[in-house]
Image: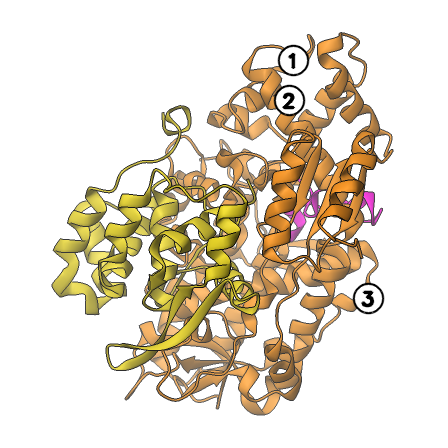
Chain colours: A orange, B yellow
Amino acid sequence: MSETRPKIGAHGKVFRDPVHGLIRIEPEDAFLLELIDTPEFQRLRRVRQLGVSSMTYPGAEHSRFAHSLGVFCFAQRMLDMLRHRYRNDSTATDLLAAQGPTVKAAALLHDIGHAPFSHMMERAFPATAKHEKKTVELITDGASSIPAILKAHNLDPVKVRDIIKRASEHRLLVDIVSSQLDADRMDYILRDAVATGVKYGAFDAEWLLNSLCIGAEPGTTGQAKETEWRLCLEEKRGLHSAEQLIIARMHMSLQVYFHKTTRGWEAHLLCLFKHAAELAKQNKLPKGTPGIASRFFAGEGKLDHADFLLCDEATLVAAMQGWSLATKPEHARLAELSKTYLGRRKLYRCADVSAATTAQVVKLTKALGGLGQENLDWVLDGLDFNSYKDFGSVFRKPVREGEEAEEMASTEAILLADGSLGGASRPVEGQSKILGKLGEDSRHAVYRLYYHQRLAEKVEKVLEQLKLKPV
Amino acid sequence: MHPIVPLLQLLHLLKRVEGRKKLQKLVHILQECGVPFPERFEYSYYGMYSAQLRSEVERLESEKLVNESPCAAGTNLSYSVETTDDLGKLMKEIGLEEEPAWAATAKHLNGLTAQELEGISTILFLKECGLAGEELKKRLLALKPHLEAIYAKCEKEAGKLPDYRPAAAAA
């Protein structure tokens, strides 16, 4: 637990925020301030929300810290809205009152396991592949200061963990933090749009919040139990705001998250970090490399708790600054990659091969293997690189009668309900012409090949041989 | 190796998988065993699910490397995934005809029912959440009461799964 408890006034604590205006922590939620003051949470100030997106959108320097506060704010407003809506039904208000602090803690802490450069680092090493895994560890592991704070306020870290892992038996609570309609994506779409200056991310969040209701899991027969409650939108009011949210997310994915230049810089860093790890494992990183960076790469992202708290983007950029000046021949590639990254000079060319078939892509990978090392000389950014929230998963074909239950329909679809507590719900795409049309062809496959400019001639010849015309 | 190769190898090896759900669980379990399937899974009402995998199979079907055809799955209609000659030709062309090291496990798992695989997959997920023993069983049955009758078998199957991760990573 923190050494001194942060003070909170009678009116609570407010944070100014570009998305929410004011984010308020009420006096009864003082424990959240203690969580915010932990080194685990403060570290998020030094991890940017969009990794290397600022190479493309200079304003995208916002942190996971600000985003996490924003997710808490939306989660709190969702809980308040539902409590107000069902104020005459004690089953709902009791559950929301009892579980509210747990949901708020989960919303606040959902991203604390992110490595430097956020989702980019998930592509680099197995130990950093799932930030959720590290998040869960920080919430439940004794080395972290978080579980002690939760327990001191009679909150069970396991219940916080279960909401983040989507393993809670209360699906409604999971939906608030992790679903197509969750506080997380509502905040990141708006925040990323504000920071990048991309206007496509706008949607009517106020109306969406105002339309929230509690429906029943599709297919529930009889009166829904609390564990079968789902977060839904009221059919009469929420349809258009749901459409806006989906379209905003799709446009943000194509314009920002999957931007060719951003993905190119991610590929550049991927090559740099993979190469640094190879050198670190042989104890060959240049002298003067910060100790934490050396241990990070030697362990391929695996660090003890003390190191994790200090490992942020500044640590790795400081390492790159040193590497850019390295003069030994064995460090030539490391120096080249670091120098060009810091100076924003493109080293890798891009060929968009989105039109390629699976057979062509597999053959391409094999041919490239003969030209140079994967994730050093070339990177194929394809099927496995859609970790930036799979917007395609919303649009499933409608379930036909008698067909195997379409699994995503109940878990990933935005649900519409009539607004009564635990009323029947159905996926939004069935009610929306726009989403129904999108659902007919939901796949946005993006295949790009990034290759070192030294290999340009050879790679372009391979592309020609495989009849792959870059688009 | 392209990240889709493990999926191609799996389908080529099994030739036929009875139901989309079964394929989802098969890939998740093999991934948990350390086979390098890159698909991202999330816990859903029906257990571990990867939208990415679903999308990949749709793509393979559109390119005629696999066929999906209706088959019976309990009281529901499901879709089996079957490989085509084109997939066989592709595997030959890229020199991946030999059975992978994890072939026996994949074949064994494909012989289990979709529900049994759902149980095993959920046990692995709950283990990753930090649950064990009675606590794990209690949570699994709270989430999936329909698996009660087969829980013991699922637990036994989950317990004997091999680890295919490289020794260094597993250590």
Q: Which mark is residue A276?
A: 2
Which SS class for mark 3? helix
Residue A39, image quadrant: top right
Q: Are marks 1 and 2 in contact (CB under 8 Å)?
A: yes
Relative placement, left or right, of A94 versus A382 is left
Q: Is residue B64 above or below residue A101?
A: below
Which SS class for mark 1? loop
Query: Which residue position is annotated with label 1?
Result: A285
Span colored in magenta: A47-67
Query: Which residue position is annotated with label 3?
Result: A199
Q: Same chain, marks 3 and 2?
A: yes
Task: Please tell me how crowded label 3 is: few (under 14), some (14-19), or many (20+) other residues with Cα within 10 Å.
Answer: some
Which badge, 3 or 2, is on the more N-terminal residue? Answer: 3
Chain to which the residue tagged by mark 3 belongs: A
In the image, residue A345 lies at what x, y percent?
Answer: 87, 33
In space, the residues marked 1 and 2 are separated at their CA atoms by: 7 Å
Give the residue type at disc 3. Answer: Lys
Give the residue type at disc 1. Answer: Leu
In the image, residue B33 lies at what x, y percent?
Answer: 34, 41
In space, the residues marked 3 and 1 are separated at their CA atoms by: 43 Å
Task: Please tell me how crowded label 2 is: few (under 14), some (14-19), or many (20+) other residues with Cα within 10 Å.
Answer: many
